[in-house]
Amino acid sequence: MNVCVVGSGAREHALALACARTADVVVTPGNPGIRGRSPEGHTLESSAAPPEEIEADLYIIGPEAPLVAGLADRLRGLGGLVFGPGADGARLEGSKAYMKELAAAARVPTARFAVFERPDDALAHLRAAVGPYVIKTDGLAAGKGVLVTSDLAAAEADVVAKLSGEAFGVAGRRVVIEEALVGREASLLAVCDGEHALALPVARDYKRALDGDLGPNTGGMGACSPVTFVEDKVVGEAMDRIVLPTLGELRRRGIDYKGVLYAGLMLGDDGPRLVEFNVRFGDPETEVVLPRMEGDCTGLLAAAAGGRVPDAVACAPTAAVCVVAAAAGYPVNPRCGDSISGLDAAGAVAGVTVLHAGTRRDADGVLRTDGGRVLAVTAVAPTIAAARERAYEAIGAVEIEGVQYRGDIAVSERVGSTG
Ligand code: AMP
Ligand code: GLY
């Protein structure tokens, strides 16, 4: 079997390694870390060719932008077996206003909301509301388009910056203002075949830039799985009240949703509520979920893309922790071109895999930073505490000038709680 993964980040690196247990994998455009052979002997390759020009038995699309732009439709049009929703399903992530409207139609428990395009209306709404205020760009903003604040003046300034186009261009010219939810957050990734859905092990993402959940929102600074405060019962409830009704509503609208439906959950006293949907594997959640799954990842995703997802997935009794090494200046203005070393020492720590994200190898052979999130250092061990220790030992061996990473990934379940 030949698999083509679309994307260039640590999520795609993790997907490539999981699929290369049973298949040869090409990643486009890939990154310098994706090459060679898997322990099972399958090839791993990065290719500059566009996905339409790569022959594969299965295409897996990593990031949201190509999904929203209809890449899955184009590949299906060429006869490909594709894991990832078409542009119609991807609107769930491409427009938060659409997502909220669909969730309301499906009676999914989520925050109350209102949508604005005119600053005066949005400001009047904010002034009449009680904080904390949650303001989101309607369109894609690489995980950075959400402000949660109790400061009315900051909320007002954010609304004006977004709606004027100054902060996020066209993605911000419409905003969704939401009620603030209270609780603990967790990420549920469900593999969908259009009708049925299979929950993967739950993960937790650390979205803020700084320790103690301070600083701006980022694409994700680390992750861990399992999440001990999420009981199986809660996963069942989230599937029954959030994922399956949404799939049903998509079907009613004629949308055949094949891919991951990622539900960002807020777990409060009245059960799970939906914070957001993503239409793809989470990053960095994927880096900790896939290493815990046993069996044939390629087969599972091919089954979802072409037929029926299985009823269950085998999961190893292990824990995984991922710590992201980000470039100097991330998330505001990441610096590219800093040299990276120490990866052999990091990768030699037991249970550790160093996944590449924003890296490039220059003609002089030197590996350099080439994006905000540079590496995702992932460790697997019997317990979260042991995995955490391994991940931090490994990231301590990495040398990048100005590197930033959080020191508190998976340290305590209380970090990241908004309640
Ligand atoms: P999103 O991109 O929609 O996932 O939002 C990014 C982060 O902002 C979430 O992971 C939450 O931490 C926070 N957030 C988003 N919406 C809400 C909400 N309604 N209430 C509280 N926090 C929220
Ligand atoms: N980890 C959050 C995301 O993938 O959007």
Image (cartoon, rainbow, N blue to C red):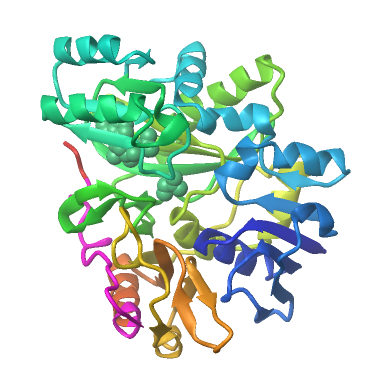
Asked whether the viewer can see residue 331, the reply is yes
Q: Residue at coordinates 41% horizontally, 21% vertically from top-left?
A: 174
Between 342 and 225, which is closer to the camera in this rendering?
A: 342
Q: 162 left or right of 201? A: left
Q: Is residue 413 shown in magenta?
A: yes
- For this orientation, the residue located farthest to the right is 79
Look at the picture and state if 173 lies above or below 34.
above
The residue drawn where x is 35% and y is 51% is: 205
Q: Is residue 41 left or right of residue 370?
A: right
Q: Quadrant location of residue 397?
A: bottom left
Asked which quadrant contains residue 8, the reply is bottom right
The answer to whether 268 is drawn above or below residue 357 in the figure is: above
Which of the 4 image quadrants contains residue 49? bottom right
Q: Is residue 30 above or below residue 274?
A: below
**Count of labels in the image:** 0
Residues in magenta? 394-416
- Quick check: which quadrant has ligand 1? top left
Q: Residue at x 70, y 79 (%)?
A: 40
Give the quarter of the figure containing the C terminus.
Answer: top left
Residue 231 makes an appearance in the image: no
Rendered location of residue 30, percent (x, y): 62, 66
Q: What is the x, y in percent for residue 287? A: 48, 61
> Is residue 132 covered in magenta?
no
